[in-house]
Amino acid sequence: MVTPFQVFASEEAKEGESLNIPEIVLEHLSDSYEWHIASYEGKHLSVPLPVIVRSSETGEWFIGTAHGIESSDRFYFDALHHGKIYEHLSDGCNVRPLDLSITKAVAQIWIVVAVLLIVFLSCSRWYKKHDEKSEAPKGFVGAVEMLVMYIHDDLIRPSVGEKHYKQYAPYLLTVFFFILTTNLIGLIPLFPGGANVTGNINVTLFLAVCTMLAINLFGNKEYWKEIFWPEVPLFLKAYPVPVMPVIEFFGVFTKPFALMIRLFANMMAGHAVMLSFTCVIFLGWSMGVGFGIGLNLFSALMLLFMNCLELLVAFVQAYVFTMLSAVFIGLAHKEHEH
């Protein structure tokens, strides 16, 4: 969810200029080097984030904020590359320097990690003080235990298999709660929420790569046999062209690719739709009072509906990513069938 004040953080909000909805939506979906909170009468309230870049030419480090980049002669924000930092070289070329900045997405991930640590350490403290056989947890601890046991017993255990599920349960539970918490905090319209973390393809790529490594590094011999020498007629796997091994080998990469795109596209689409309905409010007032009142009511109802839907999507996407990861891991531990 995005507040109307956040929508007008860009220059398109100036009086007399037309409202460029696609540009505003793309601007707020992209990552940034400062955390914008609100705008009022042309003044922007933002939280500066550390900018850390290394020059590709001189090797010198720049450590500062976005305002320091704007006043720099060497570095600049490139509008054609979604506001990323680029460097002017002495030969006239422009290149991307080594960028280790703490962007909005990175700061949001740190907040999510802090929230998860607080939640699970507080729950573990309860178990240290109580005997689980004599007293069942209640309240918040009981709700967390119920969710953990639901994912562990009803999703991870049957999907991975009885023999191997214990070694993968910590990773899969971590992935589930990280995605769920990130999605929920991303729906909060005010600081420190609102960042589009799981709508950032770099984040979903990292999660997909972790699953791919868990599948392929620990897969058994039967898994690799099914890829390079499957139980099919000889002409399909060897002569004249190894059709099935090629298809199965591509499956090693298409499975994590599907995980990456599914999570990225669903979360980005939800944020884009809510931003678009927020912009419709201002678009209606620019067309007149009658349009403004009508579109305000329509947009408010749609925003309420979309936020309720996104609460469901936040859980569903975390569940689907964890479920597919567990299924793929389970397929990597397939037992030989006699």
Image: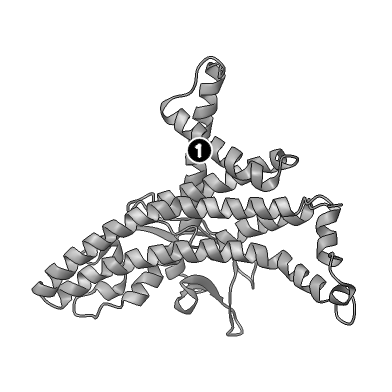
Of 209 and 108, the residue lying toward us: 209
Q: Is residue 181 above or below residue 11?
A: above
User: Mark 1 highlights which residue?
Assistant: 147
On the image, the x and y values in percent for residue 131 come to 56, 16
On the image, the x and y values in percent for residue 233 come to 86, 72
For the view shown, which residue lies furthest in the bottom direction?
92
Which residue is pictured at 38% across the width and 67% down the height?
A: 272
For the view shown, which residue lies furthest in the left direction?
289
Q: Is residue 247 above or below residue 141?
A: below
Q: Is residue 99 left or right of residue 269?
A: right
Of 153 and 80, the residue lying toward us: 153
Of 133 and 89, the residue lying toward us: 133
Amino acid type, label 1: Leu
Which residue is pictured at 87% across the width and 66% down the height?
A: 229
On the image, the x and y values in percent for residue 57 come to 64, 73
Q: Is residue 75 left or right of residue 243?
A: left
Q: Is residue 227 above or below residue 21?
A: above
